[in-house]
Image (tube, rainbow, N blue to C red):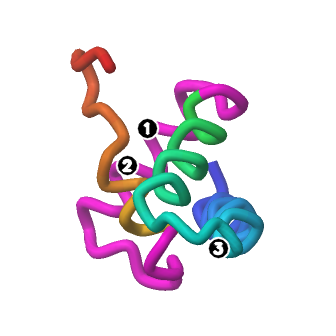
Amino acid sequence: MDIERLVKMANDIAHFFQSEPDHEEAVKGVLGHIQRFWDPRMRKALSGYVDGGGAGLIPLALEAAKRLPKAGQTV
């Protein structure tokens, strides 16, 4: 997985949801989109990247990515 591409994609999703007035709903929107449309390898790569600091992710994308289930966890 090209992490730079995943960071850009996550940031693009977060930019879309930034107009949501309820911050929690915005986070849930980003998280839900990633969980529904990204394959498990992409989610795992993003989650691992966030564990290492998540440089380059905008705050909304970072917050949502931190809520991704870890390997073996269910939502």
Q: Which residue is labeled 1 in the image? A: 44
Quick check: 66 above or below 67? below
Work out how far the residue at label 3 is from the one at label 1, CA to CA, in angstroms.
Answer: 24 Å
Q: Which residue is labeled 3 in the image? A: 18
| Place of residue 11 in the rendered image (x, y in percent of width and height, measured from the top left) | 65, 71
Mark in front: 3 vs 1? 3
Work out how far the residue at label 3 is from the one at label 2, CA to CA, in angstroms.
Answer: 21 Å
Q: Are marks 2 and 1 in contact (CB under 8 Å)?
A: yes
At horizontal 28% and vertical 75% (from top left) the residue drawn is: 53
Badge 2: few (under 14), some or many (20 or more) residues near its Cα, within 10 Å?
many
Q: Amino acid at mark 1?
A: Lys
Q: Secondary structure at mark 3?
A: loop
Q: Which residues are magenta?
A: 36-60
Quick check: 37 above or below 48? above
Q: Are marks 3 and 2 in contact (CB under 8 Å)?
A: no
Residue 48 painted magenta:
yes
At horizontal 50% and vertical 53% (from top left) the residue drawn is: 25
Q: Tag on residue 47?
A: 2
